[in-house]
């Protein structure tokens, strides 16, 4: 009869290797020379176990130890990965013993605490967001950015803008404006005096391809920003980006803030107009001070690759055709192109003239300010004229394919009346299209020649 230890012995890999394996009926020679010493018949004492057993157990325990350490290290790695914001750029900025929370607090500090603002800029790695953040920082305000770095257009351009901001002392947290926890946390860390809300799904024609993204950013995201601002104590004043597209099919020119804006030609325009109504509700109920800025086709260095002047430049330099839209009866399609520096001045003036919000802890002390301004250039230029300017600047003949403007969100023309902005904000655009496009082309050539290196 076999003892339990016998049973174990026969089942162990050692036993199988040394005594059980046979080839062609022959017994295989054991791999080790040491034979087990038996103290009692049928039993092997622990001291007398064969060296193979010791080595095997030794190897087993080493393997277990390594496995244990590896698991602990892995757990630490994931713990820190989850605790740290995911942007590479953000990770790069964090000094070794600092947390992203400390960096946010530093970034939000104005140069002079008594006069400077603490501003949260959403969409800070976007085109307008980058320029506004830089201008605020440059004049001494504290600025914290937030951006989700989505893939609507080349995210590497957004990363480069974010690097530029970081270089200038503006930290951009990688997070979506729909992440209420993150936003609320930012407000727990910093008492922001102002929010410049520029994060949005832009582009009029893309709405046909991805309508949900407009609802996600321009409606749900906007509501989320307002919600967090409404609950903050003190409540910040808000300046946010609406759009000239809200005028839609309006044919009365130039477009004035009092004109009807209830005939949007795209879902994009509809979400921006909805945003203005949502702003009204939050102002009315919660006492938030809100200023909406209707931007008119903003262009310039660090611009958006999805916009016409940018994509035409790229195609013309590569010898590719460009598709130029025209109106009925071969009429021109025109835009009130507005240079980025002028728009930035308008944004800062809106922020400086914004009154304080009047709500706190669910109570509202009096009416809060609610404003809407056009930020345009007051001189519409036909797209065909833009192409001629580009041809001269790039010294390239464009391969134009002229087609009737498809009904996919575009309107025939935009033209801003800026009297109100001039009166209330001192807004006065100074850059004509030729000068602005020259600055854009210089930036474009430098940026992409450097990227190739
Ligand atoms: O001001 C605004 O409200 C809007 O301005 C731009 O929208 P859009 O004026 O359509 O700017 P582009 O897409 O750069 O188009 C400019 C002009 O070029 C024309 N175009 C565009 C693309 C193209 O392939 N061909 C072409 O002729 C358009 O019809 C339009 O007249 C922005 O993309 C929107 O995000 C912004 O809100």
Image: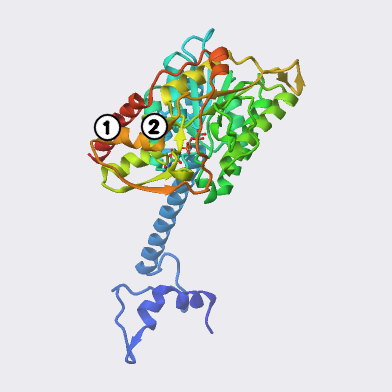
Q: Which residue is mark 2?
A: 161
Residues at marks 2 and 1, CA–CA distance in whole angstroms: 25 Å
Toward the viewer: 446 or 134?
446
Alpha-carbon neighbours of circle 2 within 10 Å: few (<14), some, or many (≥20)?
many
Question: Depth-wise, is mark 2 or mark 1 nearer the camera?
Answer: 1
Q: Which residue reaches farthest front?
A: 329
Alpha-carbon neighbours of circle 1 within 10 Å: few (<14), some, or many (≥20)?
some
Quarter occupied by residue 29? bottom left
Which disc is residue 393 wearing?
1
| Residue 407 percent across, percent down from the top left | 53, 48
Say if disc 2 is inside 8 Å of ligand 1.
no
Reply above or below: 17 against 125.
below
| Residue 169 percent across, percent down from the top left | 41, 22
| Residue 67 percent across, percent down from the top left | 43, 55
Q: Secondary structure at mark 1?
A: helix
Toward the viewer: 376 or 120?
376
The quarter in which the C terminus is drawn is top left
Q: Which residue reaches farthest top?
A: 114
Toward the viewer: 167 or 255?
255
Q: Are marks 2 and 1 in contact (CB under 8 Å)?
A: no
Q: Residue at x 50, y 78 (%)?
A: 7
Q: Residue at x 24, y 37 (%)?
A: 449
Q: Which one is earlier in the sequence, the residue at label 2 or at label 1?
A: 2
Toward the viewer: 62 or 154?
154
Reply above or below: 256 against 249.
above
Quarter occupied by residue 249? top right
| Residue 156 percent across, percent down from the top left | 37, 40
Q: Which residue reaches farthest right?
A: 363
The answer to whether one can see residue 339 in this image is yes
Quarter occupied by residue 197? top right
The answer to whether one can see residue 221 in this image is no
The quarter in which the N terminus is drawn is bottom right
């Amino acid at each position: 009869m076999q003892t339990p230890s016998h049973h174990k012995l026969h089942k162990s890999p050692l036993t199988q290797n040394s005594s059980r394996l046979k080839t062609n009926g022959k017994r295989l020679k054991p791999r080790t020379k040491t034979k087990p010493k038996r103290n009692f018949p049928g039993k092997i004492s622990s001291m007398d176990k064969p060296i193979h057993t010791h080595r095997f157990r030794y190897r087993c325990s080493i393997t277990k130890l390594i496995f244990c350490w590896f698991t602990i290290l892995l757990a630490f790695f994931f713990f820190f990965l989850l605790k740290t914001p995911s942007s590479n750029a953000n990770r790069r900025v964090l000094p070794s013993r600092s947390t992203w929370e400390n960096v946010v607090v530093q970034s939000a500090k104005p140069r002079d605490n008594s006069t400077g603002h603490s501003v949260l800029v959403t969409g800070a790695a976007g085109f307008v967001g980058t320029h506004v953040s830089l201008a605020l920082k440059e004049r001494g305000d504290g600025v914290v950015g937030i951006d989700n770095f989505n893939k609507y257009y080349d995210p590497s351009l957004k990363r480069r803008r974010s690097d530029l901001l970081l270089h200038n002392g503006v930290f951009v947290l990688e997070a979506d404006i729909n992440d209420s926890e993150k936003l609320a946390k930012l407000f727990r860390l910093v008492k922001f005096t102002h929010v410049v809300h520029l994060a949005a799904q832009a582009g009029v024609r893309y709405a046909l391809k991805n309508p949900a993204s407009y609802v996600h950013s321009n409606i749900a995201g906007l509501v989320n920003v307002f919600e967090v601002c409404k609950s903050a104590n003190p409540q910040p004043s808000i300046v946010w980006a609406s759009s000239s597209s809200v005028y839609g099919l309006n044919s009365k020119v130039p477009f004035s803030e009092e004109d009807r804006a209830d005939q949007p030609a795209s879902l994009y325009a509809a979400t921006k107009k909805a945003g203005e109504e949502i702003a009204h509700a939050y102002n009315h109920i919660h006492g938030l001070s809100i200023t909406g800025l209707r931007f008119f086709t903003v262009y310039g260095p660090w611009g958006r690759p999805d916009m016409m002047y940018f994509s035409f430049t790229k195609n013309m330099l590569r010898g590719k055709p460009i598709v130029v839209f025209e109106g009925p009866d071969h009429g021109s399609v025109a835009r009130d192109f507005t240079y980025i520096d002028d728009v930035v001045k308008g944004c800062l003036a809106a922020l400086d003239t914004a009154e304080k919000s009047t709500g706190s802890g669910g109570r509202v002390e009096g009416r809060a300010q609610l404003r809407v301004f056009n930020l345009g250039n007051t001189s519409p230029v036909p797209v065909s004229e833009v192409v001629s300017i580009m041809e001269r600047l790039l010294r390239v003949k464009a391969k134009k394919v002229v087609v009737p403007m498809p009904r996919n969100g575009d309107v025939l023309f935009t033209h801003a009346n800026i009297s109100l902005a001039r009166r209330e904000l001192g807004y006065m655009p100074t850059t004509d299209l030729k000068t602005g496009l020259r600055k854009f082309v210089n930036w474009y050539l430098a940026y992409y020649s450097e990227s190739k290196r």
